[in-house]
Amino acid sequence: MTAPFHSLAQILDRLTLTARWVLREHEPGTDGRCPRCHTPDCAVASAARDVLAAVKRNRWRC
Ligand SMILES: [Zn+2]
């Protein structure tokens, strides 16, 4: 069986990249609304921010 990731660090790297990409996609426009979800408080963007915060905490612990 071939694992796509070899270490926790690689998993965290991939998570960070994905979360950053999601945040870029869901960044509020000039009207303060997410251009993808068309809501002023985008749940996807806040989830991505949570992931980034969780990864940061994990990195410090390692
Ligand atoms: Zn969104």
Image (cartoon, rainbow, N blue to C red):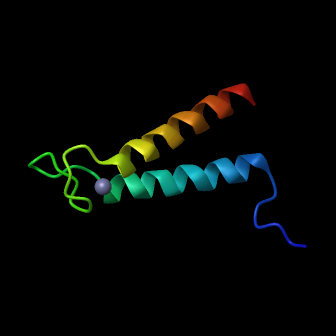
Residue 42: x and y in percent read 29, 48
Regarding ligand 1, which quadrant of the image does it lie in?
bottom left
Is 35 placed left or right of 13 in the picture?
A: left
* Residue depicted at x 66% and y 33%: 59
Quarter of the image that includes the N terminus: bottom right
Q: Looking at the image, which residue sits at the far right?
A: 1
* Number of marks in picture: 0
- As drawn, the residue found furthest toward the left would be 31
Residue 3 to residue 24: above or below: below
The quarter in which the C terminus is drawn is top right
Q: Position of residue 33 (x, y in %)?
A: 17, 50
Would you say 14 lies left or right of 6 here? left
Q: Residue 54 location, x and y as percent?
A: 58, 35
Q: At x 67% / y 33%, what residue is drawn? A: 58
Residue 1 higher or lower than 46, as above or below: below
- Please state which of residues 43 and 58 is positioned toward the viewer in this rendering: 43
The quadrant holding residue 4 is: bottom right
- Tell me which residue sits at (20%, 51%) in the image: 39
